[in-house]
Amino acid sequence: MAGVFEVEVDGVEHDHGLEHHGEPHQFDVSKLSPEEKWRVEHAKMHAKHKGHEAMHAEMVLILIVTLVVAQLVLVQWKQRHPKSYNLVTLFQMWVVPLYFTTKLHWWRFLTTWFIFSVITAYVSYRATRKPLACTTPRLVYKWFLLLYKISYATGIVGYSVVMFTLFGINLIFRIKPEDAMDFGVSLLFYGLYYGVLGRDFAEMCADFMASTVGYYSASGMPTKHLSDNICAVCGQPILVDVSEEGIIENTYRLSCNHVFHEFCIRGWCIVGKKQMCPYCKEKVDLKRMFSNPWERPHVMYGQLLDWLRYLVAWQPVIIGFVQGINYILGLE
């Protein structure tokens, strides 16, 4: 059904390039271009908020104070009770995007979210079983390392598409800027979101598995003595010497002289975010572990994901809290 609107601001009609001044401006919205519709909405918004400058300043002040207080509370919570903070943050990361995408009917995201949730739930279930199956640690690290690499590649492709669009390269392929930008931003969101969520689930599974194996405990001494030929991450024998080249997997020695499967210790440090020896808790030198310069960006990407966690998990909650304060105070 076509709609007819008359735009009037402060007693004076404004056409914003749509009509000539004179008589009241009535026009059929269905016949307008997207840019003209945006101008109409812009004019209506200015008319609605005219004379509310003091109220807007108060709302901005509430927003700034709430952001500062929330940041202080989250930092103190993370320092004093890291386990509960990480658990709640993980739940927020998992649920908050689900709420918004369901509301907006983004079925493509919901499909990938469902597939990720089913596989991760199965892997997490295997990681929390006691006694721990001998194949579980490798299964866990393989899945989360695969997810980490896919999310990393997806994020890089999305970022590249966004940059190509900004430089106008999409026009060479006759792709509209808005379509190219939507595609790039979507890929960037998928990569960063599943990268953050995968790392958090991997950290949780790493804690469960390491405590079950018995060579690692979050505080205190390990419950079992580590033999020279046993990997403290997976608890399985080490078949290849440090100086030898393995067919399937090599062996890696940390600066503390403890030896591990290379795949296990890399998964422990990068995917599981445990930058310490699984046995003696000595700090791991990531620069020494990743001597190849092409592997170092993975470390920086992991730091980016840690920063993004706050933006995705807590920012919507804080904004919702601010909206509640504004509603209670009658600020609209």
Image (cartoon, rainbow, N blue to C red):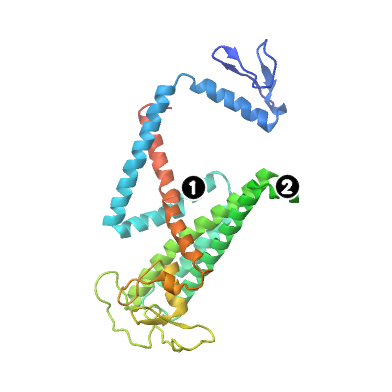
Q: Residue furthest left?
A: 220
Q: Quadrant of the C terminus?
A: top left
Q: Secondary structure at mark 1?
A: helix
Report the disc number at residue 332. Answer: none
Q: Residue at x 56, y 44 (%)?
A: 104
Residue 260 image-quadrant placement = bottom left
In the picture of the structure, the residue carrying the numbered disc 2 is: 171
- Residue 23 is situated, as x and y percent measured from the top left of the image, at 67, 10
Residue 273 drawn above or below residue 262:
above
Asked whether residue 107 is in view, the answer is no
| Closer to the eye: label 2 or 1 | 2
- Residue 257 is situated, as x and y percent measured from the top left of the image, at 35, 82
The alpha-carbon separation of the residues under discs 2 and 1 comes to: 35 Å
- Residue 110 is situated, as x and y percent measured from the top left of the image, at 56, 53
**Front residue (pair 258, 211):** 258
**Front residue (pair 20, 199):** 20
Asked whether residue 11 is in view, the answer is yes
Residue 267 drawn above or below residue 98:
below
In the picture of the structure, the residue carrying the numbered disc 1 is: 99
- Residue 93 is situated, as x and y percent measured from the top left of the image, at 44, 54
Find out whether the residues at labels 2 and 1 contact each other: C-beta distance under 8 Å: no
Q: Amino acid at mark 2?
A: Leu
**Front residue (pair 330, 156):** 156
Q: Amino acid at mark 1?
A: Tyr
Residue 286 image-quadrant placement = bottom left
Q: Residue at x 63, y 46 (%)?
A: 166
Q: Secondary structure at mark 2?
A: helix
- Mark nearer the N terminus (2 vs 1): 1
Residue 25 drawn above or below residue 182:
above
